Image: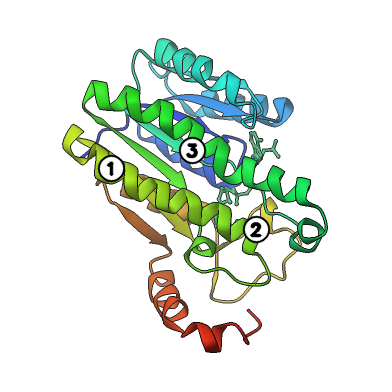
Amino acid sequence: MNTLNRVLIFGATSAIAEQTARQLVAQGASLYCVGRNRDKLMAIIGDLRARASSQQYIDGCVADLTDSAQHPNLIDAADHQLGGIDGVLIAHGTLPDQKACQADTSLTRQEIEANALSVINLLTLLANRFEQQQRGVIAVISSVAGDRGRQSNYIYGAAKGMVTLFLQGLRNRLAKANVNIVTIKPGFVDTPMTAAFDKGGPLWTAPEHIAKGIIKAMEHGKDEVYLPWFWWGIMLIIKHIPERIFKRMSL
Ligand SMILES: NC(=O)c1ccc[n+]([C@@H]2O[C@H](COP(=O)([O-])OP(=O)(O)OC[C@H]3O[C@@H](n4cnc5c(N)ncnc54)[C@H](OP(=O)(O)O)[C@@H]3O)[C@@H](O)[C@H]2O)c1
């Protein structure tokens, strides 16, 4: 069982990350929160401090995570301020406009940078540090979209799929170093990212519920979790549809 006393959160302004942070604070954790939007981040840090005890350290800093040159300093700052890191959650991401990406290669590259390369850069630095300390847990929010490419969102899916595969390799490498690598695969979650979607219905979940699943998976050192669990079954079916049939479907 991993203890999550000192946690570093990337993409802390995400609705899922914010709910995870609240639940971690309620459990007594200290947090270092990295987010891009200054006003939103400061409001979240203020709210978390109001929920924390005087023994808990809650702070963070503003950063655009596609600026990979900043990554080493962000990790060092968190390590220094928290006095060590037990767990990391990487939550940032963007939902690309698929049609716009199809017409613009630079936009496609930006989306791959935001959703995959920035995450891989952070993971490479964190993995080396955690391998040395021989303990800890690193969780990343990937997506069910990374399990199979679909015409409606294959730029996002390809980026998340890259992260999922990278995490599989990292998990394999770090298993002997006592470091847990957790892949979080949510389905449809009601957050600002999905604001343009028609919500409602049994497949939609609140971010609080996903947050609970993330913490449980990190504490128990799970490998890959679908949240909610029933997405495991849905994606099992989707992954097994033969390609000659799948390519004619509109999903
Ligand atoms: N919602 C879903 O249905 C769903 C499903 C599966 C997976 N996910 C994944 O869950 C994670 C959290 O998303 P969410 O649903 O909570 O949506 P959200 O509230 O829109 O959060 C996305 C966050 O990513 C941050 N971000 C984007 N690019 C960034 C950058 N370059 N540097 C720093 N931060 C950046 C955004 O910051 P700003 O506030 O500055 O824009 C925003 O806070 C994402 O990885 C997403 O892909 C979501």
Distance from disc 1 to disc 2, alpha carbons, whole Å, reads: 31 Å
Residue 202: quadrant of the picture: bottom right
Vertical order, 88 against 200 (above or below): above
Vertical order, 78 against 48 (above or below): above
At label 3, counting other C-alpha atoms closer than 10 Å, the crowd grade (few under 14, some 14-19, many 20 or more) is some
Assess whether mark 2 and mark 3 are in contact (beta carbons under 8 angstroms). Answer: no
Which percent across, then down, holds residue 191?
Answer: 64, 54
| Image quarter hosting the C terminus | bottom right
Marker disc for residue 120: 3
* Residue at (51% x, 58% y) in the render: 143
Q: Nearer the viewer, residue 121 or 96?
A: 121
Marker disc for residue 155: 2
Distance from disc 3 to disc 2, alpha carbons, whole Å, reads: 16 Å
Secondary structure under tag 2 reads helix
Q: Horizontally, is 137 left or right of 36 in the view?
A: left
* Residue at (45% x, 14% y) in the render: 76
Residue with the mark numbered 1: 219
* Residue at (44% x, 37% y) in the render: 89
Amino acid at pointer 1: Glu
Of the numbered discs 1 and 3, the one sitting upstream in the chain is 3
Secondary structure under tag 3 reads helix
Of the numbered discs 1 and 2, the one sitting upstream in the chain is 2
Distance from disc 1 to disc 3, alpha carbons, whole Å, reads: 22 Å
Which percent across, then down, holds residue 17?
Answer: 53, 41
Residue 68: quadrant of the picture: top right
Is residue 197 visible to the viewer in this orientation of the structure?
A: yes
